[in-house]
Image: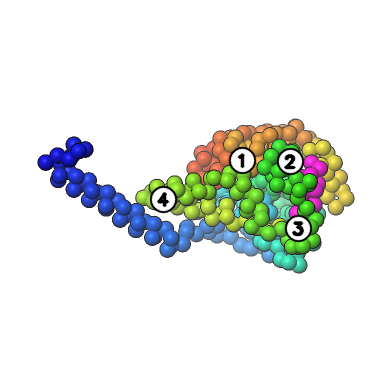
């Protein structure tokens, strides 16, 4: 006997049994997804060299015997955790750099306490960063180092390099997806519009800027993306590698840190509102910042499909740096996939190791 679909009864029963089995396995995978912890992140062995307030300085243990002379200091953005550089074995920029023979340090951040609401841009650029740099120099016995800053960690690195880099032994400077023209960050301009956003009231009322507030701001850049991602996870529960990758990146993207109140107030007014860095009117602690004074080898890497720091926001940077040895590279990928995941492994990481290898002896 044939059915309307042209299938005989045994074939129909077999197809139904197959679909039932798939549904059962999907449910089991879904139960596993919701009842098990995600992969352990940031597990590359390291030592904590500084633990002071919101500041953390890590030193990763070497994986090879022969190490380049010039060490690397990774500087994370103040809104996010540094484990984006060290996801899991095989997908860790830190591990990749260690295996390539670099001595790797990272300046990372914890949530500022209520009593740290008075931290300013000066605290980060002229206290935390110089303290980390001096400790790296003491730890390695080397007079100079390479600084690699990601996103707003790149902004902090630029400001420090312009003010203190020559005095503190900066040998090379690398920035990823680092904005200098804040008018090109359209969505952030919209939610921080001075006509509607009272940053003084927020800071005076709450002290520190809450992480949930910042998370919502990031989420607004792609308002439908999170729902779409959840649907994709349901559709691909069978794919363990996809689920593992999703859980890693979703955890990091959701792990947004609050910002110290005065620091948030200052960066909002000086950068988002006045765009002082682009117009060469930026100062930190009353000291004028001149990016043209940065003379060391410089590399900036932008992401072609970056929705957080569009390429237009970082495009003027290369022309503002004074070094004769400078390069800008625009690679395929987004703000996060540029530095972590399969795209980064194929594109950014080899480029970074090659560039640094020529300048780290």
Q: Which label number is shown at residue 234?
A: 4
Q: Label 3, on which residue?
A: 202
**Which residue lies at the image location 79% right of the left edge and 41% below the top edge?**
275
Q: Residue furthest right?
A: 286
Nearer to us: label 3 or label 2: 3
> Badge 4: few (under 14), some or many (20 or more) residues near its Cα, within 10 Å?
some
Residue 294 at least partly seen: yes
Nearer to us: label 1 or label 3: 3
> Is the stretch drawn in magenta largely helix, strand or loop?
helix
The spot of residue 308 in percent (x, y) is 64, 43
Nearer to us: label 1 or label 4: 4
Q: Residue furthest front?
A: 4
Q: Helix, strand or loop at disc 4?
A: helix
Q: Is residue 221 left or right of residue 33?
A: right
The Cα–Cα distance between marks 2 and 4, rounded to whole angstroms, is 37 Å
Q: Label 1, on which residue?
A: 307
The Cα–Cα distance between marks 3 and 4, rounded to whole angstroms, is 38 Å
Q: Is residue 301 above or below residue 147?
A: above
> Badge 2: few (under 14), some or many (20 or more) residues near its Cα, within 10 Å?
many
Q: Residue furthest left?
A: 1
Locate the C terminus and report the quarter of the image it occupies: top right
Residue range corresponding to the magenta coloring:
263-275
Give the mark nearer the N terminus: 1 vs 3: 3
The spot of residue 173 in percent (x, y) is 70, 42
The Cα–Cα distance between marks 1 and 4, rounded to whole angstroms, is 25 Å
Q: Helix, strand or loop at disc 2?
A: helix
Q: Label 2, on which residue?
A: 182
Give the mark nearer the N terminus: 3 vs 2: 2
Q: Helix, strand or loop at disc 1?
A: loop
């Amino acid at each position: 006997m044939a059915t309307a679909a042209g299938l005989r009864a045994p074939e129909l029963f077999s197809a139904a049994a197959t679909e039932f089995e798939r549904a059962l396995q999907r449910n089991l995978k879904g139960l596993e997804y919701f009842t098990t912890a995600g992969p352990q992140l940031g597990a590359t062995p390291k030592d904590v060299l500084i633990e002071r307030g919101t500041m953390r300085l890590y030193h990763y243990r070497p994986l090879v015997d022969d190490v380049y002379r010039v060490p690397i200091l990774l500087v994370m953005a103040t809104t996010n955790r540094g484990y984006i550089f060290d996801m899991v074995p095989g997908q860790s920029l830190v591990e990749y750099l260690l295996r390539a023979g670099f001595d790797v340090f990272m300046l990372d951040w914890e949530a500022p306490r209520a009593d740290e609401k008075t931290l300013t841009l000066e605290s980060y650029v002229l206290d935390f960063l110089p303290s980390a740099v001096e400790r790296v120099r003491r730890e390695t016995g080397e007079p100079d180092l390479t600084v690699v800053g990601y996103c707003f960690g790149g902004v902090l690195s630029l400001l420090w390099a312009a003010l203190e880099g020559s005095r503190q032994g900066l040998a090379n400077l690398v920035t990823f997806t680092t904005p200098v023209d804040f008018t090109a960050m359209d969505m952030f301009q919209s939610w921080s519009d001075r006509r509607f956003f009272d940053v003084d009231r927020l800071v005076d009322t709450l002290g520190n800027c809450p992480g949930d507030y910042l998370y919502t701001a990031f989420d607004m850049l792609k308002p439908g993306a999170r729902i779409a991602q959840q649907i994709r996870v349901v559709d691909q529960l069978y794919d363990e590698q996809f689920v593992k990758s999703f859980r890693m990146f979703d955890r990091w993207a959701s792990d947004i840190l609050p910002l110290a109140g005065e620091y948030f107030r200052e960066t909002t007014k000086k950068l988002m509102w006045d765009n002082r860095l682009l117009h060469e009117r930026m100062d930190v602690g009353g000291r004028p910042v001149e990016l043209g004074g940065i003379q060391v080898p410089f590399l900036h890497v932008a992401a072609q499909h970056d929705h957080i720091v569009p390429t237009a926001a970082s495009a003027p940077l290369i022309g503002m740096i004074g070094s004769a040895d400078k390069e800008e590279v625009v690679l395929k990928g987004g703000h996060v996939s540029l530095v972590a995941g399969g795209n980064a492994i194929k594109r950014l990481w080899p480029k970074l190791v090659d560039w640094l290898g020529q300048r780290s002896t």
